[in-house]
Image (spheres, rainbow, N blue to C red):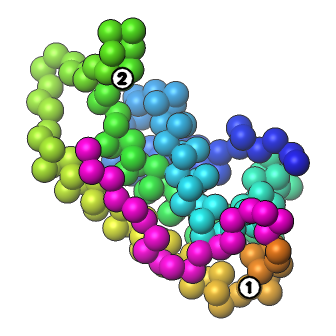
Amino acid sequence: MIANDSVLLVTKDDIYKYTSVSGNVDVDKISPFIKVAQDIEIQTVLGTALYQRILTDVRNDSLTGDYETLLLQYVQPMLIHYAVADLMQFHGYEISNAGIVRNSPENTILPDKNEIDTIVSRQRKIAETYRLRLVDYLTYYPQLFPEYTANQNNGQYPSTDPSNYVSFNL
């Protein structure tokens, strides 16, 4: 199996460009949320075989044609908003030797839980809209992506359930 662990399907610049995330947010703070969102949300929709195909093509800089269209027009918008929704929930916290701490720069007002929940919920709704579009596209054009309907070789089969999101309560 090809190691695709370090391949991210969106960049920090994509996050900055298409969301309200400030350009001064450290990429090291964003990358884990991109990785988790793509491993969970994207792989759930695409299935393991198609997901691995896209990761390999991105890693090898050989993504073209229908696969490039799939990534750019359907996968990336969904991924961006799932990653940002998770980032918004956890970005103010850090695990250090002192334990879990909450960062609060001077002259800032931290939003309350309800405000954060509202913003996160909106990001998830945006992501779900893109998820629906992705599922519709794959369902309508499965012949373009043979990996989508192929045996997943002990991997995850694609989920066509457009609202497969599980919410977390903190």
Tell me, yes or no, whether the highlighted magenta stretch contains residue 56: no
Query: Can residue 64 be seen by looking at this rendering?
Result: no
- Closer to the chain start, of discs 2 and 1, is 2
Task: Answer with left or right where residue 73 lies relative to residue 63.
Answer: left
Please identify the quarter of the rendering in which residue 65 is found. Answer: bottom right
Please provide percent x and percent y for residue 55.
Answer: 75, 53
Per the picture, the main secondary structure of the magenta-coloured stretch is loop
Q: Name the quarter where the C terminus is drawn.
A: top left
**C-alpha span from label 2 to label 1:** 42 Å
Horizontal relation, residue 100 to residue 10: left or right = left
Name the amino acid, label 2. Answer: Glu
Q: Nearer the viewer, residue 159 or 123?
A: 159
The residue labelled by disc 2 is 94
Q: Pick the residue in front: 15 or 39.
A: 39
Q: In this view, does 40 lie above or below 129?
A: above
Q: Tell me where residue 14 appears, x and y as whole percent.
A: 53, 48
x then y, percent, for residue 100 = 31, 21
Q: What element carries label 1?
A: helix
Report the span colored magenta: 152-170
Q: In this view, does 129 lie above or below 15?
A: below
- The residue carrying mark 1 is 142
Which type of secondary structure does the marked residue at label 2 adopt? strand
Residues packed near mark 1 inside 10 Å, few (<14), some (14 to 19) or many (20 plus): few
